[in-house]
Every structure is written in structure tokens, then in C-alpha cells.
Amino acid sequence: MRRSSKIQLIILDNLVWVLLLLFFVFNAVNTPAFFTLRNQINILFQSSLVGMLVLAQGIVMMVGELDLSIDSTLAFAPGVTILLATSVFPMSPALCIILTLIIGMLVGLFNGVFVAKIKANSFLLSLSTQIVMRGMILFLVPFSLAGLDPLYAYLGRGRIGSLFPVAAIAFVLIFFIFEFIFRKTVFGRRFMLTGGNRRASFISGINTDRVIILAFVIAGMLAAVAGLIAAGRQNAVSNNMGAGLVMMAFAGAILGGCSFKGGVGKPIGMLGGALLLGTIDNALTLLNVNVNLVSATKGGLIFLAILLDQARFKLNELIMYKENIRKLAGQNPDAGA
């Protein structure tokens, strides 16, 4: 393959980092107070919440499915946990954290089993799960449950050295852990293979149903982690936490290299997608952009993500097509005679 084609494929594969770099340089020059250490740390902190949902959505998209319930899981898992701890039976903060993660995983398990075993449409199933959980948490937690234990709120409120938020550090660390898992282990590569060609993966010996279920379970767990961050930030659990963030999770995952077609994507790209969303949100805030225009901009980002998904796929096909034509012409120089 020609060097130019390799460079083009590398750029397409890491397009989100190119976009992030361009946007960062533009704002460093034009946006007041953007290029400061405190603001950069703030971007990491603000990106941590949606970043967990981007990673959750991206992992499910890797296996060729969708999960619309992650934003409701974000509120449902901590909401049910704190309600049980305050109204039913007392629990230690550590046990509350574990139970929050377990509830998130159980939601993912429910979705995964129905998608993998019952062959339910993941879009419609997770949409119904989202509506049910949001309705349940609105009923169970009509008012915010404030005054959380410091340990339970630590992920969202804790700081190291009074400057670095624990959420920002955990955010980056979690992405790099998953990057290692999906790039360096057989377990991680099975997700990509299942999403790329489910039938061929099954024939080759991969338990594709198990992989799909695990993808949803991991997504549920990450949504619960996002719930811990959200609850810690406000030192309370409210029934509207995470509302509407699922669309931004889609945008971040697709900008980061995932596709609705499945079989592509990597956590490091999703990290770039989450940081791009956080950087744009931060810049709009610093520029005092009208809140309605901020909402319109986010809608535009979703549209851009959809266009990028299609454009990336078509350009990749075109580059590979030209390479194949070039190879065939080289093998048979008299073909055009």
C-alpha cells in the first residue's frame, strides 16, 4: 500500500484528534481564559460524566447494537441505592457504591439477555427500558436525596492536592484501561469481531451471545459510574440526572470512530470524542453563548457525527478500492492494451 494511502487511512481512523487539535488551537487564540491550566482541568472534569456514557455507548456499538437506556441508568442506579440505604435498611457508603454498580450491571444484563437470546431490537428494547427507569425514578425520588456520605460522593467531589478532581483522573484512567483490554487482549478483540461479522465470529467459535450480553453489562456498569460522578458533583441524587445525555453519548462515540454498522471503534478514539464534546461545551460557556444556541449546537454535533459516520465509511471504501485497482494494474500491465 502506498504511503499516501496509509496516511489517509490513519487520518480517517484518528479524525477526532485532528478535529480536537484544530478546535483547541482556535479557542486558545480566540477564547478568553481558555488556555489556562485551571480551565483545562475543568474540561477534563466536565468531560468525565458524558465520557463514561460515550464509552458505554461505544462498547455496545462495537458489537453492532445500541443502548438508549444508559442516561436513565445513570439516575436509576444511585437513586434506588440511596433510597434503599435511607428508607429500608442502612448500608455503609462502600456497600452503597458496590450496590450502585451492581444495579447498573443488572440493567445491562436485562438488556443484553433480551437482545442476545430473545433477539429483540436493541434500539426499541433499550428505549422501553429507558422510559420505564426514568418513570420509576421520577416516582421513587420526587425530590432530591441530598447530604450524601463523603465517601459515596468522593468520585464526583473529591480532589487531589485541592486542584485535580478525582473524577477527571478516573475518567482518563478508565479509558486507558479499556483501550488496553480492547487492543491487547483476546477478550477485547472478540467484541470487534462480533460486531464486524456476527455469523462468521460464531462459526469461528466465539460465543457471540455472551459477548453481546457482556457489552451491555459493561455499559450498565459505566452508566452507574457516571451516576456516582453526577451524584457526587451535586452532593445529591435527583431524578433528572443524565436526562438527554444519551444523544450526546451517540455523538461522542461516532465522532470517536464508532459506527452504527458495528465492528469498528476504539476507546482511545472515544476519549477524543468525549474531550471534543467537553471542549466545545466549555468554549460556548466561556463565550457566554445563549443557552438555546448551545442546545442547537449540540444538535448540530449529532448531525455532524452522523455525516462523519457515513463519510468515513465511504472514504475508507474509496481508498481501498483505488489501492486494489492499482495492485491489479501492477500485476497485469497489459490489461489496458
Image (cartoon, helix red, strand yellow):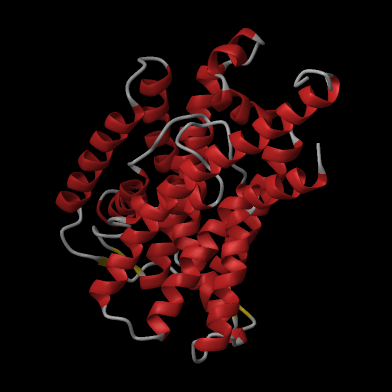
- From the top left corner, tell me how far across and down residue 228 is, in percent: 44, 58
Q: Quadrant of the N terminus?
A: top right
- From the top left corner, tell me how far across and down residue 34 is, in percent: 53, 85
Residue at horizontal 72%, vertical 27%? 324
Residue at horizontal 50%, vertical 52%? 255
Q: Is residue 183 above or below residue 276?
A: above
- From the top left corner, tell me how far across and down residue 246 is, in percent: 35, 50
Q: Residue furthest top?
A: 203
Asked if residue 201 shows in the view, the reply is: yes
Q: Is residue 217 left or right of residue 144?
A: right
Looking at this view, is 258 or 48 the one in front?
258
Q: Is residue 308 left or right of residue 166?
A: left
Residue at horizontal 33%, vertical 57%? 242
Q: Is residue 103 left or right of residue 37?
A: left
Q: Is residue 325 above or below residue 335?
A: below
- From the top left corner, tell me how far across and down residue 53 is, in percent: 45, 51
Looking at this view, is 19 or 249 the one in front?
19
Residue at horizontal 28%, vertical 66%? 296
